[in-house]
Image: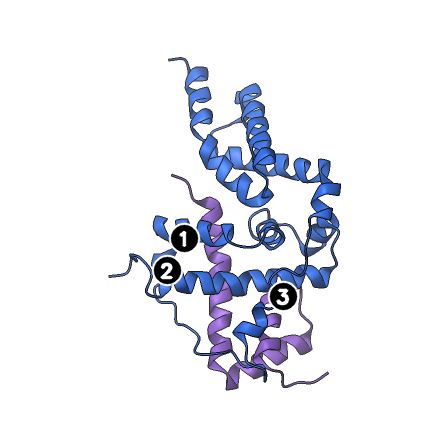
Amino acid sequence: MTDLAKFADDVAESRSYLLRFARLQLRNDAWAEDVVAETMLAALEKPQSFGGRSSLRTWLVGILKFKIIDCLRANSREVASSVNTDEDAELEDLLFVPDGHFRGDTYDWPNPEQTLNSKQFLEVLDVCINQMPPTMGRVFLMREWMEFSTDEICKELQITSSNAWVLLHRARLRLRECLQLKWFGNGPAKTST
Amino acid sequence: MKFLRTCREVAALVSEREDRALSATERAVIRAHAFICRRCTKWEAQVSFMRKSMKAWGNYRD
């Protein structure tokens, strides 16, 4: 097999890996399919620009992020009109008592380093992110995965910075509950012994 | 600005610290609260763990 054919195969094999990120970030399967196709095309058109300095997947994800930004901009009207900053408005009322204290006990999360190296844990994270309401999930991944600043998020989604901070805060509260339930609590297998 | 805040307010500040530069007063509010509240200290650790998890999630490949 030629190097180029091998390269094309490796790119093709990364499709489902890329799709997983694109779906979670865009919350729209058709758009996700499009950006992944564009990413793979861009990679196949310029195989020489992959210098092998990083792994192929890291390089592809770098291209994917640009394609996602393009997609959000091209669909900015639709993206902005689907934004709902009221998502999970009652969440804080559930997690805090009326005088402002945390309701119930809060949790200890043991073995953080070990946890981060667990493939199963990262799959649980996938599930938890997927369960966030759409706007919250998008904002959270724009911040934590695309590494946008709050200002950039506000500009892309046409929301105020206080809306963005509230959504990010609720996303973290929700993620904490989800991880507690599905990983640290009495959930399925853990890596700790 | 009120110095002593509820956990609900402090928890939001701890979260916002990941997303914007807090004022000196806001940082002092978090530190003061940490002396009297173990639950919010745990929340601080969890927020920083979640940030690290998301980094690991983004670098995950298999």
Tell me the tag on residue A124.
1
Residue in the foreground of this view, choosing between B28 and A90: A90
Q: Quadrant of residue A88?
A: bottom right
Instruction: Find disc 3 in the rendering and name its residue.
Output: A89
Looking at the rendered image, the quarter that the C terminus of chain A falls into is bottom left
Please tell me whether mark 3 or mark 1 is closer to you in this view: 3
Q: Can you say whether A42 is above or below A92 in the image?
A: above
Amino acid tagged 3: Ala
Judge whether residue A82 can be spotted in this image: yes
How far apart in space, not on screen, are marks 3 and 1 (Cα)? 24 Å
Amino acid tagged 2: Trp
**Whole-percent x, y for residue A151 in the image:** 72, 54
Residue reaching furthest to the left: A193
Other residues around mark 3 within 10 Å, as few (<14) / some (14–19) / many (≥20): few
**Whole-percent x, y for residue A135 in the image:** 63, 52
Instruction: Find disc 2 in the rendering and name its residue.
Output: A183
Horizontal side of residue A185 vs A30, given as left or right: left
Amino acid tagged 1: Val
Looking at the rendered image, the quarter that the N terminus of chain A falls into is top left
- Tell me what residue is drawn at x 58 percent, y 71 percent: A92
